[in-house]
Image (cartoon, coloured by chain):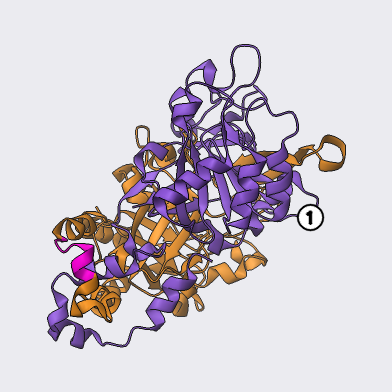
Chain colours: A orange, B purple
Amino acid sequence: MCNACLIENVKRETLSRRQLFTGAAAVGAASVAAGLMSARPLLAQASGRIVDLTHTYDETFPTFSGEPGIVYDKVYDLAADGYNLYKLTIDEHTGTHIDAPMHFSADGNSVDEIPVESLMCPLCVVDISAKASEDPNAMVEPEDIEAWTSANGDLPEGALVAMHSGWAAKVGDESFRGDGTNLAFPGFSKAATDLLMEAGAGAIGVDTLSLDPGNSADFAVHYSWLPSGRFGIECLTGLDQVPATGATAIVGAPKHRGGTGGPGRVFALL
Amino acid sequence: MCNACLIENVKRETLSRRQLFTGAAAVGAASVAAGLMSARPLLAQASGRIVDLTHTYDETFPTFSGEPGIVYDKVYDLAADGYNLYKLTIDEHTGTHIDAPMHFSADGNSVDEIPVESLMCPLCVVDISAKASEDPNAMVEPEDIEAWTSANGDLPEGALVAMHSGWAAKVGDESFRGDGTNLAFPGFSKAATDLLMEAGAGAIGVDTLSLDPGNSADFAVHYSWLPSGRFGIECLTGLDQVPATGATAIVGAPKHRGGTGGPGRVFALL
């Protein structure tokens, strides 16, 4: 998994802190570490900057079904009761949310069962915004993955591969969901996600309402990717603020027992 | 905030990667960086191990009110509909969850408005499990904070200070909520949280149902800490698996607009 090499590096550490502070190597050592580690998808590369990949959502946030994905019921109010509290009714697949394997499989992991180690992983961003601006049902195809690896090297083991189609910017507009008549938005092609499985990716993410494109008739990606034990993330935002490679994703999936997914908080660490 | 010094360090980087790899400083450089940075609460110290501080929860999970905090309604089923999906009705303050400032204030930030930078911060664990084993309403007092700083140095700016009382292990038992008659569990004293405010802490967390102890009659911590613009986390677990200092907390707060808090996913990065 994505942490193994980091842990291995730490185990290799042999110098004591005293040696470190007295050694001539100290100046610029942070840079040295960044250089040494840059061939690997390591958290220790991180500068400490955090980028939020999560939309704020409410009852107006677009959903696949078109129905409100969250309903608020204010059951306690500060003026009357001394504190504020809502009861929320939430469709699990609303806002920036996780698709757990069991969303599309009989025996896959529920959202609380996704191994925690896979919730911190290298983040790879595949930008198809140019072709998506021409075709709302554009797909991440194998050649987009190949173009990514040509530019950035092999996909890191266990990576979250996220499609950046530019759709996050449309979230306040009807065009986020469709073309006026039908659902229409970018997604992954099954051929691309088959390739990602072979390459060892652990998760896929999209900045649209579905892993499959809006005009999908068969949900081929949902029916192959999720039953393989991998998870997905839908309605990401902020992907224009992270590099194609080098960031670490932290996937704050919800942890209600037996859930098929749910709204979460997703971050990129730079 | 907790990331400022990291970013500053990165800005100071002056050596090129080529220089780094050819320089004599390369051997053990990762250790050097760890040493240089150890005086500061930096993510770059991280080994890459992730510890989940979040309980799995369902309708049986203990709540402050005693009512179920989540109700499941399975609206789509794989066999009949082709996929699984639940509609969930959730009390915002259920499971491992965030208390946003507006939970106990008229104009404080809602959960979606908590600045993202404060959701990644140094994690400090104050262990009061010994006295909590004698008194279920034990409190983190100023002397516990002072004992922590004597052992570990000053609190890092913007830290999440978490009470480890040992209560997480009781979650399946009635004693998690009370003594059979009354609510009874550990929490913070207001004197301690006043001290933490002065010291620049950004958040407090507990492994119990409330920031205030179970026998609190006035919710003094809720009414002072949250209106100050700081947030809280209740029902943490896993605090026995992280050191008193040196870990980084990632707080995956939910992001529904205007929320007073809600179930989240909280991690420690070691």
Q: Is residue A15 magenta?
A: yes
- Classify A125 as above or below B53: below
Q: Where is residue B264 drawn, in percent x and y?
A: 53, 45
A81 or B1: nearer the viewer: B1
Picture quarter with the C terminus of chain A: bottom left
Q: Where is residue B254 drawn, in percent x and y?
A: 58, 49
Q: Where is residue A37 drawn, in percent x and y?
A: 23, 70
Residue drawn at x 33%, y 42% as measured from the top left: A115
Residue drawn at x 55%, y 32% as measured from the top left: B208
For label 1, the residue is B107
Residue B70 visible in the current orientation: yes
Direction from residue B175 to residue B32 in the image, left or right = left
Q: Quadrant location of residue B59?
A: top right
Dot 1 falls on which chain?
B
Direction from residue B197 to residue B150 in the image, left or right = left
- Classify B56 as above or below A13: above
Secondary structure beneath disc 1?
Answer: loop
Q: Within 10 Å of the Cα at label 1, are there few (<14), some (14-19), or many (20+) other Cα atoms?
A: few
Q: Quadrant location of residue B201?
A: bottom right
Q: Quadrant location of residue B202?
A: bottom right
Residue drawn at x 23%, y 84% as measured from the top left: B17
* Amino acid on which disc 1 is placed: Asp
Q: Is residue B163 magenta?
A: no
Q: Bounds of the magenta span?
A: A13-20
